[in-house]
Amino acid sequence: MTDETLLYTAHIPVRWGDMDSYGHVNNIIYMQYLEEARVAWFEQAGVAMSNVPFGPVVLQTQHTYLKPVVYPATVVVELRAGAVGRSSLVVKHRLSTVEDPLTLYGEGFCKLVWIDHDSGKSVNLPDHVRALFGVN
């Protein structure tokens, strides 16, 4: 795989309660959309997230808001492969909507680090996770 390979696409309906007083989706809700897409991707890829000794934690998230999303809409979150390190990986994201698929509403990335949950220290990425990014 190369950088920017599409990993997963999530469709997330915007709820009325996602809106803020400005009449568009509140900025923090985007982080929830991104989290929901990452968790769904991990589950689909067979990466256990609950009650496991090792797993991903968010180290850094960046999102650039390009255009506000308003209700009613369905957000489309595309997750793409970014850089892979010894214990970390980058998942890039792009947001559009089902109703306006050619408009980019936002973009950014999330850097995740695999840790030992007991010690809190980083560990090597599992081979099956590296394989998702085409890295041996």
Image (cartoon, rainbow, N blue to C red):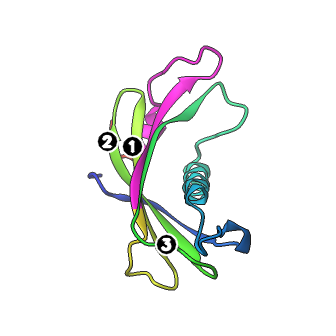
Q: In this image, 92 relative to 76: left or right?
A: left
Q: Position of residue 92 (x, y in %)?
A: 39, 53
Q: Which residues are magenta?
A: 107-132
Q: Earlier in the sequence, mark 1 or mark 2?
A: 2
Question: What is the tally of numbered marks visible in this picture?
Answer: 3
Please report contact status of discs 1 and 2: CB closer than 8 Å, yes or no: yes
Question: Mark 1 falls on what kind of element?
Answer: strand
Q: Position of residue 13 (x, y in %)?
A: 65, 73
View extreme (bottom): residue: 99
Residue nearest the observer in this picture, 129 or 107: 107
Which residue is tagged 1?
90
Question: Mark 3 falls on what kind of element?
Answer: loop
Magenta segment: does it hold 68?
A: no
Q: Is residue 19 above or below residue 124?
A: below
Q: Position of residue 110 (x, y in %)?
A: 44, 45
Residue nearest the observer in this picture, 8 or 63: 63
